[in-house]
Amino acid sequence: MRIRVLKSKPRSARGQALVLACLSFLVLALMTTLSFNLSHALRQKVSLQQHSDSLAYSMAVMEARALNYYAVSNRAIAASYVAMNSLHAYMAVASVTGQIMRASRNNFYIIAAMEFAQCACWTCFIHCIHGIQAIRVASKYGNAGRDYDGKAKNLENSFNQANKGLDMLVETVHASQMAVHARTVQSVMNGNANGLSELTNYNAPGASNVPGGVGALNTNEFNCAIDGMVCMGGQGNSSNEALARVMTEVSNASRPGWTANRDFDLPKPLYLHPSFLQEMMMDIPGEGLHYPIPFVHKGTAKLVETRSNIHGPGQVGGNTGKVIAADEEGAMFNQWKHGVGPYMPFNSRIHSDTNGGGHTPNGAHSDEHEFDGVNTQSFMSCIGQGNCFMKFRADPDANDDYGQPSVYSYVTRQFRVGNPNQAPWELNANSELNFTHGGQGTARLTLAAGEGSGLSKALVYYHRFGSNGWREAPNMFNPYWRAKLHPFRATEAATVLGAAGNTDAAQLAVTPGVSL
């Protein structure tokens, strides 16, 4: 009996290949979608970081321009004080003309006495005639002195108005400094004011403004650069006296030579009007030699602590510029006929202060000379009445960049579009893909990044032109402030991130081995 065994045919594998192909296409589609989302996120991140850099740099440029404006306007304030000094010098010179005439009058009384002393005999009667003529010349000099006093007196109203105008200019310039400061603070508070919003619209539409906490850091950094502003954590404010001494010394050092030191070469002071010199030297006496003695003549004008300091050094310790004072003094030499008036002193003095000042000679004086003084009010109450200025508040700490202000930018932006019609690679509005596998539950895959952020720092720094320009300390009298992007210190980045409310990133910033 035979037994027949039937062999079964092998099952086809074509169905398994189809399943594997579908799974492969699914993975490929997911990889492609993730690739699109990653490239989109990277492009958005680069764009946001570039926007953050440009925003930090632009805010720093605005601060640098403000500091340069302070420097230029501080020079204008110092120039106003220099102009006041020059006005006082001119007024002292104008007032001395009457004094010179009276000094010549007194010399001619001496000459008359000399002539009369020589007319004791009949043959010397000519000296008696000369004595009478000398008295007449003395009288002419006396009359001329009164005339020149009147001319100086007529100038005094214009002199006072000019000084008041210059004083008002100082107050106005400082008010403009404070206005610029307020506008600059407004700009760095949120990175959106005074035209900065155009950066966001151009570089990263939809990006956030600078958070309030970061804006507060920017404001404090900028305020700490100005001596007298409210500053948290920086150097303390200088006293009003210290601030006044700075501007007083700068102003006194800036005076032109004629205002600071008036002397002259033989035979006469050429800065006096030619008509006055002609009258004093020739017209009144008619003959002889008549001139101020050059070796004893002096004159100056400066900001001083008291009017008695007029001939003290301009950079004397404690000089806070409470008074503007000027003087002109010397002695007259008169030689006529047979007599000599060798040395008759003259002087004129003028000063302005809060008590109405003073003016010698009295015949050339008609009104009070008011001057508020340099930096007499506390900085924050100085607008319109205290003659303040902007002074740089230096810091000796290199880790604080020597007081040069930093500017921070922290901005965020949604990277996820959330609209599959505009970004089909996100698949749906949530950019999420869910997988369900029986008892293992549901898995969720997020395809697109949500929110991104950009963090930047810029430094406003001082650098004078030239090979050794960096040696000059930062100040607000020379306009050499500039801006640049600057690297973060780890603790500094943590402070900024914490102020922005990003506590996780703030912790990462100070984690060893982790770089932002």
Image (cartoon, grey):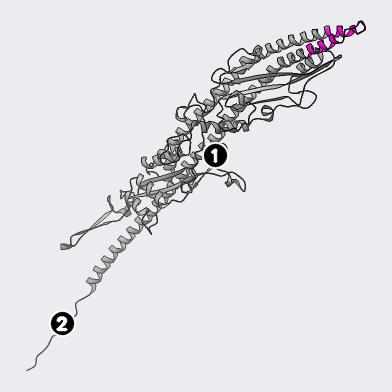
Q: Position of residue 229 (x, y in %)?
A: 45, 34
Q: Looking at the picture, which amino acid does disc 1 mark?
A: Asn
Q: Is residue 126 magenta?
A: yes
Quickly name the residue at label 1: 475
Quickly name the residue at label 2: 8
Residue 198 appears in the rendering: yes
Magenta stretch bounds: 107-131
Foreground: disc 1 or disc 2: 1
Residue 73 appears in the rendering: no
For the stretch drawn in magenta, what is the main secondary structure? helix
- Please identify the residue farthest to the right as the structure is shown: 123
Task: Find residue 346 and report its image quarter.
Answer: top right
Q: Position of residue 373 (x, y in %)?
A: 54, 25
Task: Identify which residue is drawn at 76% across, 16% down.
Answer: 276
Quadrant occupied by the C terminus = bottom left
Name the element at disc 1: loop
* Label 1 CA crowd tier, 10 Å (few <14, some 14–19, many 20+): many
Task: Find residue 159 and report its image quarter.
Answer: top right
- Residue 67 lies left or right of residue 158; in this view the side is left
Q: Position of residue 387 (x, y in %)?
A: 52, 27
Q: Is residue 114 magenta?
A: yes
Name the element at disc 2: loop
* Label 2 CA crowd tier, 10 Å (few <14, some 14–19, many 20+): few
Task: Find residue 187 and report its image quarter.
Answer: top left
